[in-house]
Amino acid sequence: MSSAHAFTFVSHSSKDKAFVEDLAGLFDAAGLDLWVDVEDIADGATWAKSIQQGVEDCQTMIVVWSANARASEWVERETLLALRLNKPVFIAQIDDTPLPIYLINRQATDFRQRQAQATQRLIRAVQKAIDGAGDAGRKQPVLKPNEHNFFKYIAQMPEGDENSRIARELFAFAETYANAITFSGRSEPAFHAHLWVGPGGVVVFSVRAYRRQPAVEIPLQYWMSFPPYDEQKEREAVLKALNALLPDGEAFELDRADRRPNLPLVRALSTDKNLKAFERIMREVIARLNDGA
């Protein structure tokens, strides 16, 4: 398509082709053009270059969000490029898959029910953005994980309210007892509690927003260079203390003392008793790491 022609790029998984074809027909009836990769790439054209050109030239983008889209590397690439270019980006959510961290602060149009109404809302929003020459998408940089969007991200996952509550408690604990907190990850965001001991410091624990079950990760393998946890028995003692927080039948084997065991937030830390017990374990770890430095 010509860059002078107003069109909307559709970022989607090919597995959601049926939905996209229906959407394209409805947009066409409303006088709006959608750029859909398979249909709009000329024979013999270089795929990646044509995709990039499509994103660069579009006035707006629609991300068809689903489990298929989350598994698609191309959907992530296309969307991040559009965000970097300050394109207005809209979301058509077609299943219960949580939004990625870089889209979490954007309003999604819910196509899971009442699709006719959802389509009209999306058409109106896209038309308004095109009429406004893209102002709706300006000054909206790609989001990096931070304390403001991490908890919003984790809250949309299964048992989200409880996972978010526990994660906030652990964040508050880290603010008090750790030396620094950093955030990382886009597809599976996390925050990490750092202690400045030894060369480069060490991560004491991380809270990771795993898709199936958010968890707190204890990187025992990283403690192996720091006394007293350079001794196997000391790491095993921590592991045994953590085992007391897990449901019956889920205790870690002792060989996990050289790895990075994960405690599911809800199953291990949902009670006030277990959360306080975990914090006591971490306070002791932090104190002993500082003493050994």
Image (cartoon, rainbow, N blue to C red):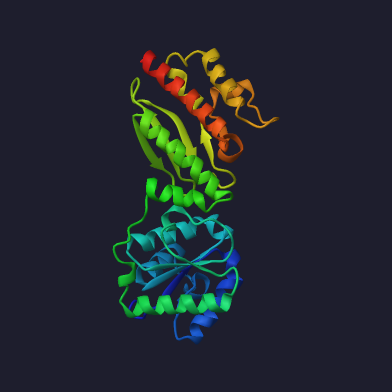
Residue 221 visible at all: no
> Residue 196 falls in which quadrant of the image?
top left
> Residue 272 falls in which quadrant of the image?
top right
> Residue 17 falls in which quadrant of the image?
bottom right
Looking at the rendered structure, the number of numbered marks drawn on it comes to 0
**Of residues 20 and 121, the one drawn nearer to the viewer in this rendering:** 121
Residue at the image position 42 percent from the left and 39 percent from the top: 191
Q: Position of residue 115 (x, y in %)?
A: 58, 75
- In the image, taking residue 191 as reference, residue 267 lies left or right, namely right
Q: Is residue 201 above or below residue 231?
A: below
Residue at the image position 38 percent from the left and 45 percent from the top: 147
Q: Position of residue 273 (x, y in %)?
A: 56, 30
Q: Position of residue 60 (x, y in %)?
A: 39, 72
Q: Position of residue 211 (x, y in %)?
A: 56, 47
The extreme right residue here reads: 249
Residue at the image position 56 percent from the left and 17 percent from the top: 237
Residue at the image position 33 percent from the left and 59 percent from the top: 84
